[in-house]
């Protein structure tokens, strides 16, 4: 079955070509059938491969095939080739499954947009690129997908290109991502240079892995750090997160698919895919986990003071991505991927829910103008509510399992650290607070919308609500793939991923560990042996913190709506700083954008127009002046010329005569 | 190599000349006939160049399709033609782009149509001649011959500041070529001094053993001449003016082929003739190349004129070519050659694009546009694709070249590699910003509201470009297989010669043996 892997990216590619070349001449029905059909078939193939894998023994769950030579130059031999294993099949399922639902939802959401065909063309192209990213069997092909999804993100953020804010946001996304890709490229170069002499010329994962042990630890650290720069760009972590909030300019289903469920998680996937390199570089792992934890907290805090519901969700995505990096950063790759999957369900759902709210509210995004929507759009409300519970980590829903898995690993893994765990737990409470703030302000209380908007409020059509319901079901059920041992589960997803991501970290003998980490590792190991009461205590702590966050939000926004106002007045300056996102955008703008332009202007004046053109034109005028002097000789008197000739002849003759003597 | 005696290269060179002569007798009023005639003629020329690709033996790294006739035997001047994998691809690029140039001049050129097409055919002859000449005198003649039609194209059919630009172009290039001429003669006399033979045959001259100091001077003279043509930073200031003022087709051919003459000159002459000097110049050239990449990109950010912006982007792109070439490893070299072709397609394509909006609006100022995606959606799609190929998005042609160059540079010197890679960020910044200002946003100017989308002729031009963007991006093997052997042989030869020189100089220091003593020793001659 796995040899049909090429079909997975093939269908979206065909959909892209059909819709792209149709030149707006086909009907909307046709366009949507093509686009959704392509995703549906891709999903079927992925599911079939998945089922097939389950029937195979764990070590047989891999298939790799080269299709044709791509860049072959000297020793370098990169081929177009695909690979599917436990990790990529899960990614394929998420991308095509959630992607399909979002495609269907988009048919309703984008129905009246004049760019309907263009939209679905881009969307299919995106899915194709994303599938290329997760099924490519070598680093360079992964990079094709990596930049390809970036392109689609650029195109879709700037989908309404007539809006300056949209085209600016698209451009910003692309350029910031390129900064990350700069690191990614250098990572590829360094890996190639260091492993090339060892015979790895193909950049294939399956050839890098067995040779990775040849790298020294500093080299592995440098390589993995460079790749992580790429991940920081793509997955919007500190300091390159600034593009993601702006990316909300795109149509809401795009935010859901690209900027929540799939593309932004590519960085996590990449680290998981290269886990064998990262496990060699504990320093990098620590940086990954630290950046992840800091981002989780930082972005969550910005989420406190935003009023645009999509912006809140965007910062929430950044924060949740931080969680995933904590997971992979403490060496718990499976936990990171698990959270990636559950996040795709509930965050995808939250965005689609936000889209449904916008649909109902005639495009309104500001939650200050909402409220009381609970009764008017019940399906949206209930699904949104479920997603909020999931992201807040309430037991029984998917987010609980994946988040606690990460937090537990952050605490217990040899690469973990209690500080990281603490940051993550605090962020969990913050997440619960700002998500329920959003929920309460949008769906509870009095409706603050204008009468005209109020009059139009209506539930979305079935084509939009059915995907919401399915995603809500997944947001609950998705977690049961990874019920931890302590709760009587088998953590099936971790076991499924084991052939790719290696056995869970606490069982691995590690080297180069810091002392604290090893101390905590021994605690973790003891606890694992001693019944795991510590795990239960930590779990209860984070759940309680989450519940406390919800209670606080309830207190602030339902019970006592005057409280937030008093609060902001009390801490006015702090509030302003947070509301302005800590002025990071302004800082970047002043330093990098305007700085570069200033340098450019200076260079143009001084170097191009001044020095170079100056010397070129200077040569010209020097010639002119010299010509002016020489012109004095050209008197026109024959006698003068004759005199010159004679003098010259005497010199030549003299030279010839004297030459033998000298 | 084929055993065919059919003189493909001579036919390729003189077929356009024949066309130019035929056009000379055409009635100047029958404009349509002249256009169709030239189009058919250049298409035929392209068709004639295709067999070169099929018959070129990719397993052999020597010079192929060799043609030789004595010209001035007493001076050692001969009519010597031949190509290797590098010139093969550049010749194909030339014949291909010339067709597009005729097509894109269909409506843009309305005055002196006959003379215009004669000039163009003449230019094509000179370009193919320069790419296949292996005799230095012959090469120099074709090299200078290229100047004249280009000078005329800018000076007669150019924009408002055309005279200034044309003279600047001419003087700049002449300054370089004069030095090259002196160096050619010096080399010629040196070879005679060494072997007693007078010859301008490059394949012979490759064997010359030139004392280091002399080699440095000769290399400097050649390099200066070629560096102006490339143009390398800081000899680039003629380029923005020439490009801005040239008619569309002139810009396309200037960017697509003429600039490559500089890089080709390095590959064919400056480096293999003076390998020790070339290796010694690696730091200087690399730093100038990186300077060009970054400086060109920053200049692009400052431009208000689309065409000027693209001209500066050429400085940046050609910086990559030079960097890869002087990495002296296979990835760098092949990437560099590939980037030459890519630049012809992508930047040529961008100039075609700009030409199309110029024909509609008669302005090139970025501020005069904005929101063009609305009235011209199909055009926008083409423009987007070509823009992406220029910023080297994976999957397009640009990526293959840029990746290999950067990889090669990184392999030979990590610092160069890292510095040059910053170009990928800057490249995206200036291109996307330009694209945004021209194509996105609201239509602000009334004149832009009613712009017509691409017509059939333009669609054909752009489709061909886009076809090559993806073909070269997804299946580069088609082109690489023709240059693999040449590039490998070339590297082996140049490195071997350099090693020989360093050995010779080391010996000289200890034994005071004159360099000439080494002339008798066999060198690894790989058909050069």
Image (tube, coloured by chain):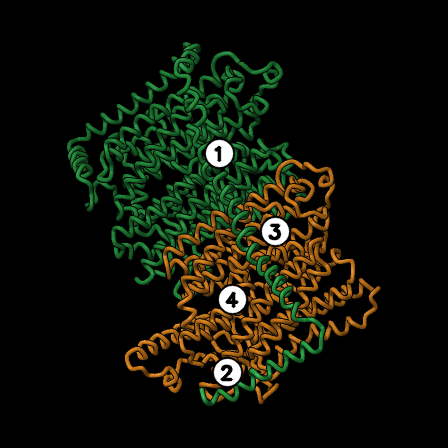
User: Which residue position is annotated with label 4?
Assistant: B224
A250 versus A89 height, above or below: above
- Are both tags, 1 and 3, on one chain? no
**Gap between marks 3 and 4, in whole Å?**
24 Å
Residues at marks 1 and 4 on the same chain: no
The answer to whether tags 1 and 2 share a subunit is no
Name the front one of labels 1 and 4.
Answer: 4
Q: Which residue is mark 2?
A: B189
Establish if A536 lies above or below B498: above
Q: Colour of chain A?
A: green
Q: Earlier in the sequence, mark 3 or mark 4?
A: 4
Task: From the top left corner, tell me how far across and down residue B220 is, in percent.
Answer: 48, 69
Mark 1 to mark 3: distance in Å? 40 Å
Whether marks 3 and 2 lie on the same chain: yes
3 vs 2, front mark: 2
Chain containing mark 3: B
Where residue B350 sits in the image (x, y, percent)?
61, 53
| C-alpha span from label 1 to label 4 | 56 Å
Q: Nearer the viewer, residue A235 or A602?
A: A602
Give the mark nearest the N terminus, 3 or 2: 2
Element under label 4? helix
Picture quadrant where residue A631 is located: bottom right
Return the mark for residue A256.
Answer: 1
Task: Quickly name the residue at label 3.
Answer: B308
Chain letter for the orange colouring in the rendering: B
Left or right position of A398 against B483: left
Proximity of marks 4 and 2: CB atoms separated by less than 8 Å = no
Q: Residues within 10 Å of mark 2 (few under 14, many from 20)?
A: some
Say left or right for B463 vs A434. Answer: right
The residue at 61%/41% (across/down) is: B437
Seen at 25% across and 51% down, the residue is A217
């Amino acid at each position: 079955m796995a040899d049909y892997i090429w079909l997975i990216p093939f269908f979206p590619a065909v959909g892209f070509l059909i819709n792209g070349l149709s030149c707006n001449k086909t009907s909307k029905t046709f366009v949507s059938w093509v686009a959704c059909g392509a995703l549906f078939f891709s999903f079927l193939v992925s599911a079939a491969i998945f089922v097939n894998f389950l029937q195979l023994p764990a070590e047989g769950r891999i298939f790799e095939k080269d299709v044709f030579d791509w860049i072959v130059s000297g020793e370098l031999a990169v081929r177009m080739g695909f690979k599917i294993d436990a990790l990529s099949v899960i990614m394929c399922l998420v991308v095509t499954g959630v992607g399909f639902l979002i495609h269907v939802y988009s048919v309703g959401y984008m129905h009246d947009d004049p760019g309907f065909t263009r939209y679905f063309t881009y969307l299919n192209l995106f899915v194709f690129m994303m599938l290329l990213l997760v099924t490519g069997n070598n680093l360079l092909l992964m990079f094709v997908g990596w930049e390809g999804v970036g392109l689609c993100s650029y195109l879709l953020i700037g989908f309404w290109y007539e809006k300056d804010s949209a085209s600016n946001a698209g451009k910003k996304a692309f350029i910031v991502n390129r900064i990350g890709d700069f690191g990614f490229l250098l990572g590829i170069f360094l890996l190639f240079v260091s492993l090339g002499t060892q015979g790895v010329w193909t950049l294939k994962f399956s050839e890098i892995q067995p040779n990775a042990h040849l790298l020294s630890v500093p080299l592995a650290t440098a390589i993995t750090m460079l790749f992580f720069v790429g991940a920081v760009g793509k997955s919007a972590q500190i300091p390159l997160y600034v593009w993601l909030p702006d990316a909300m300019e795109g149509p809401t289903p795009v935010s859901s698919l690209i900027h929540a469920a799939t593309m932004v998680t590519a960085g996590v996937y990449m680290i998981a895919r290269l886990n064998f390199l990262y496990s060699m570089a504990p320093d990098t792992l620590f940086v990954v986990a630290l950046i992840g934890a800091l981002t989780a907290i930082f972005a969550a805090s910005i989420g406190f003071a935003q009023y645009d519901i999509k912006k809140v969700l965007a910062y929430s995505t950044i924060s949740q991505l931080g969680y995933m990096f904590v997971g992979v950063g403490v060496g718990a790759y499976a936990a990171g991927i698990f959270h990636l999957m559950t996040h795709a369900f509930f965050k995808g759902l939250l965005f689609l829910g936000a889209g449904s709210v916008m649909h109902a509210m005639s495009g309104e995004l500001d939650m200050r103008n909402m409220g009381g929507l609970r009764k008017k759009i019940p399906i949206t409300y209930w699904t949104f509510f479920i997603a909020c519970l999931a992201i807040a980590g309430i037991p029984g829903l998917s987010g609980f399992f994946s988040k606690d898995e990460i937090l537990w690993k952050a605490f217990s893994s040899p690469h973990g650290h209690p500080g990281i765990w603490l940051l993550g737990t605090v962020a969990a409470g913050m997440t619960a607070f700002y998500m329920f703030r959003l929920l309460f302000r949008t769906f509870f209380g009095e409706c603050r919308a204008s009468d005209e908007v109020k009059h139009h409020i209506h539930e979305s059509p079935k084509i939009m609500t059915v995907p919401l319901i399915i995603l809500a079901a997944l947001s609950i059920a998705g977690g049961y793939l990874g019920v931890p041992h302590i709760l009587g589960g088998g953590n099936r997803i971790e076991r499924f991923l084991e052939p790719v991501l290696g056995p869970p970290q606490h069982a691995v003998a590690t080297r180069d560990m810091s002392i604290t980490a090893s101390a905590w590792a021994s605690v973790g190991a003891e606890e694992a042996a001693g019944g795991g009461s510590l795990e239960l205590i930590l779990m209860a702590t984070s759940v309680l913190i989450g519940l406390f966050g919800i209670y606080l939000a309830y207190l602030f926004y339902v019970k006592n709506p005057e409280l937030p106002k008093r609060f902001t007045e009390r801490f006015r300056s702090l509030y302003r700083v947070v509301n302005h996102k800590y002025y990071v955008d302004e800082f970047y703008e002043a330093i990098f954008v305007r700085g570069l332009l200033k340098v450019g202007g200076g260079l143009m004046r001084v170097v191009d127009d001044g020095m170079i053109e100056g010397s070129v034109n200077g040569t010209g005028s020097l010639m002119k002046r010299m010509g002016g002097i020489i012109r004095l000789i050209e008197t026109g008197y024959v006698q003068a010329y004759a005199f010159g000739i004679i003098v010259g002849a005497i010199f030549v003759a003299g030279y010839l005569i004297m030459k033998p003597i000298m | 190599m084929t055993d065919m005696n059919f003189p493909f290269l001579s036919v390729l060179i003189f077929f356009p000349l024949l066309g130019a002569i035929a056009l000379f007798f055409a009635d100047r009023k029958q404009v349509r006939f002249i256009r169709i005639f030239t189009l058919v003629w250049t298409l035929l020329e392209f068709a004639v160049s295709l067999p070169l690709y099929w018959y070129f033996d990719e397993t052999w790294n020597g010079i192929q399709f060799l043609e030789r006739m004595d010209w001035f035997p007493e001076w050692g001047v001969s009519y010597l033609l031949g190509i290797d994998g590098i010139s093969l691809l550049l010749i194909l690029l030339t014949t291909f782009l010339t067709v597009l140039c005729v097509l894109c001049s269909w409506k843009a050129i309305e005055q002196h149509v006959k003379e215009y097409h004669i000039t163009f055919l003449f230019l094509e002859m000179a370009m193919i001649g320069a790419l296949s000449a292996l005799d230095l005198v012959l090469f120099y003649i074709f090299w200078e011959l290229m100047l004249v039609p280009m000078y005329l194209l800018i000076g007669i059919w150019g924009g408002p500041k055309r005279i200034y630009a044309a003279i600047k172009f001419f003087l700049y290039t002449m300054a370089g070529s004069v030095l090259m001429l002196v160096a050619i003669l010096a080399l010629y006399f040196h070879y005679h001094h060494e072997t007693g033979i007078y010859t301008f045959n490059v394949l012979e001259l490759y064997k010359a053993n030139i004392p280091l100091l002399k080699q440095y001077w000769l290399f400097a003279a050649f390099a200066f001449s070629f560096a102006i043509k490339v143009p390398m930073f800081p000899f680039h200031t003629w380029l923005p003016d020439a490009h801005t003022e040239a008619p569309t087709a002139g810009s396309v051919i200037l960017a697509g082929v003429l600039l490559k003459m500089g890089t080709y000159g390095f590959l064919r002459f400056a480096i293999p003739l003076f390998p020790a000097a070339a290796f010694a110049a690696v730091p200087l050239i690399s730093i100038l190349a990186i300077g060009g990449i970054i400086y060109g990109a920053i200049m692009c950010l400052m431009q208000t004129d689309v065409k000027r912006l693209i001209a500066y982007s050429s400085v940046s792109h050609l910086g990559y070519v030079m960097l890869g070439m002087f990495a002296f490893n296979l990835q760098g070299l092949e990437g560099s050659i590939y980037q030459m072709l890519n630049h012809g397609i992508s930047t040529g394509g961008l100039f075609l694009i700009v030409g199309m909006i110029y024909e509609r609006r008669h302005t090139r100022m970025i501020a005069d546009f904005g929101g063009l995606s609305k009235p011209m959606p199909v055009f926008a799609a083409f423009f987007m694709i070509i823009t992406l190929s220029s910023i080297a998005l994976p999957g397009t042609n640009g990526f293959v070249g840029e990746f290999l160059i950067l990889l090669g540079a990184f392999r030979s010197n990590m610092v160069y590699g890292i510095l040059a890679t910053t170009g990928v960020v800057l490249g995206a910044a200036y291109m996307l910003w330009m694209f945004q200002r021209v194509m996105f946003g609201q239509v602000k100017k009334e004149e832009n509201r009613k712009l017509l989308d691409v017509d059939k002729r333009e669609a054909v031009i752009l489709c061909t470009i886009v076809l090559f963007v993806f073909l070269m991006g997804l299946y580069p093997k088609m082109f690489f297989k023709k240059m693999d052997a040449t590039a490998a042989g070339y590297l082996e030869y140049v490195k071997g010669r350099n090693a020989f020189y360093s050995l010779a100089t080391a010996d000289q220091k200890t034994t005071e043996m004159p360099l000439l003593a080494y002339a008798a020793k066999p060198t690894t001659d790989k058909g050069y």
